[in-house]
Every structure is written in structure tokens, then in C-alpha cells.
Image (cartoon, rainbow, N blue to C red):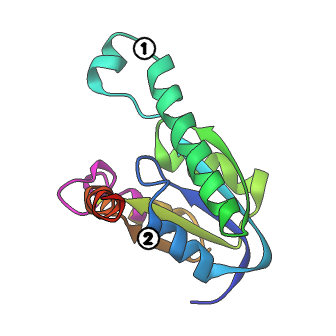
């Protein structure tokens, strides 16, 4: 995989994952700009109750943490909350950001609703850009962080 100067990242709960940030570091040229888009996903109950605030608050928290971690690694990052549908969030960004590569971060198979819905394949079908799929095991990362903190 090459090096890129404009990297678009589509991620939600995995947006602050170490594995994702390692992959971004490997893909980024010096001075690269990374745009992190975190879809504001709602649970079925939140959807039924038309609760749009909680999903946006969660997405904003993930986004802030992701941008902070990238900045701590010397990577210039911007970001925004995207459409609840990650494919639509990707489409919305294509003309606005004009990326060189797209990184889609998900949980592992069996834990990822995005994989069940073929989000990565759908994004690959929309664009000729390289699409990098990064699987982040958030549970393992939290456990490892807890061990290091002890």
C-alpha cells in the first residue's frame, strides 16, 4: 500500500482504536491531512424515540478523541459527524474532501453491524479510490490498556 496525502476515515466506535491510528500513520505522507468522519449511529430504541442527541454526543466524543490521538502522533486531522448511514456519510465526503484513499474501520466479524450490512464492499463499489479496511478489536484494546495501567 502506498503513501497518501489526503486520507478519509469512516469510523464510529473504533475511531479511537490504536490499530486504526497505526494504519493511518503507515498510510500518511509527511504533512498529510486526515479527515475522520464519525456517523452518528442510534440504537433502535433511540431511533424509535427520535432521540438524535445521544448518538451525536457519542459520535462527537469519539471524533474528539480520534483527532486528539492523531495530533499526538503528529498527524494533522480534521473531522465531522456524518450521516447515520456510513455509506451515505462516505458519499457526502467525496466531493467535499477529495481523498486519495479511504479507510473504513469496523469491529471484527460477528461484532460489526457494518460488516453484516456490507458497508466496506458497498464503499468499494462506489469509488475507484483504494479502500483500506481496518478491524479494531476495541474490547482487546481496552483490556490491554487496563493491564498497562495496573
Query: Residue drawn at (57%, 35%), measured in percent from left and top?
Result: 60
Q: Please name whichever residue, 79 or 141, is drawn nearer the observer in this view of the structure.
A: 141
Which of the labelled discs sits on residue 19, or is there none?
2
Could you say whether the residue bearing mark 2 is in a helix, strand or loop? helix
Q: Is residue 12 visible?
A: yes
Rendered-image quadrant of the N terminus: bottom right
Q: Quadrant of the C terminus?
A: bottom left
Q: Is residue 74 above or below residue 143?
A: below
Which residue reaches farthest left?
110
The answer to if 80 sits in the magenta stretch is no
Residue at 30% from the left image edge and 56% from the top image edge: 146
Q: Residue 88: image x %, image y %? A: 54, 44
In the image, farthest residue toward the right? 31
Q: Is residue 37 above or below residue 8?
A: above
Mark 1 secondary-structure assignment: loop
CA neighbours of label 2 inside 10 A, class few (<14), some (14 to 19), many (20+): some
**What x and y, as percent, mark residue 49?**
34, 10
- Look at mark 1 in the image and give the residue it sits on: 51
Q: Which mark is residue 38?
A: none
Q: Is residue 121 left or right of residue 36?
A: left
Q: Position of residue 51 (x, y in %)?
A: 42, 14
- In terms of image quadrants, where is residue 31? bottom right
Q: Residue drawn at (45%, 21%), measured in percent from left and top?
A: 54
- The CA span between labels 1 and 2 is 31 Å
Give the extent of the magenta segment.
108-120
Mark 1 surroundings: few (<14), some (14-19) or many (≥20) residues within 10 A = some
Amino acid at each position: 500500500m502506498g503513501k497518501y496525502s489526503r486520507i478519509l476515515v469512516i469510523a464510529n466506535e473504533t475511531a479511537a482504536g490504536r490499530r486504526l491510528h497505526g494504519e493511518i500513520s503507515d498510510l500518511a505522507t509527511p504533512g498529510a491531512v486526515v479527515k475522520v468522519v464519525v456517523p452518528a449511529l442510534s440504537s433502535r430504541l433511540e431511533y424509535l424515540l427520535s432521540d438524535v442527541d445521544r448518538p451525536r454526543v457519542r459520535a462527537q466524543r469519539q471524533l474528539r478523541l480520534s483527532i486528539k490521538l492523531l495530533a499526538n502522533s503528529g498527524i494533522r486531522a480534521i473531522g465531522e459527524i456524518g450521516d447515520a448511514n456510513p455509506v451515505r456519510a462516505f458519499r457526502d465526503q467525496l466531493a467535499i474532501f477529495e481523498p486519495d484513499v479511504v479507510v473504513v474501520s469496523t469491529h471484527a466479524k460477528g461484532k460489526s453491524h457494518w460488516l453484516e450490512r456490507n458497508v466496506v464492499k458497498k464503499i468499494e463499489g462506489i469509488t475507484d479510490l483504494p479502500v483500506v479496511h481496518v478491524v479494531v478489536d476495541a474490547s482487546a484494546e481496552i483490556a490491554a490498556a487496563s493491564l498497562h495501567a495496573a
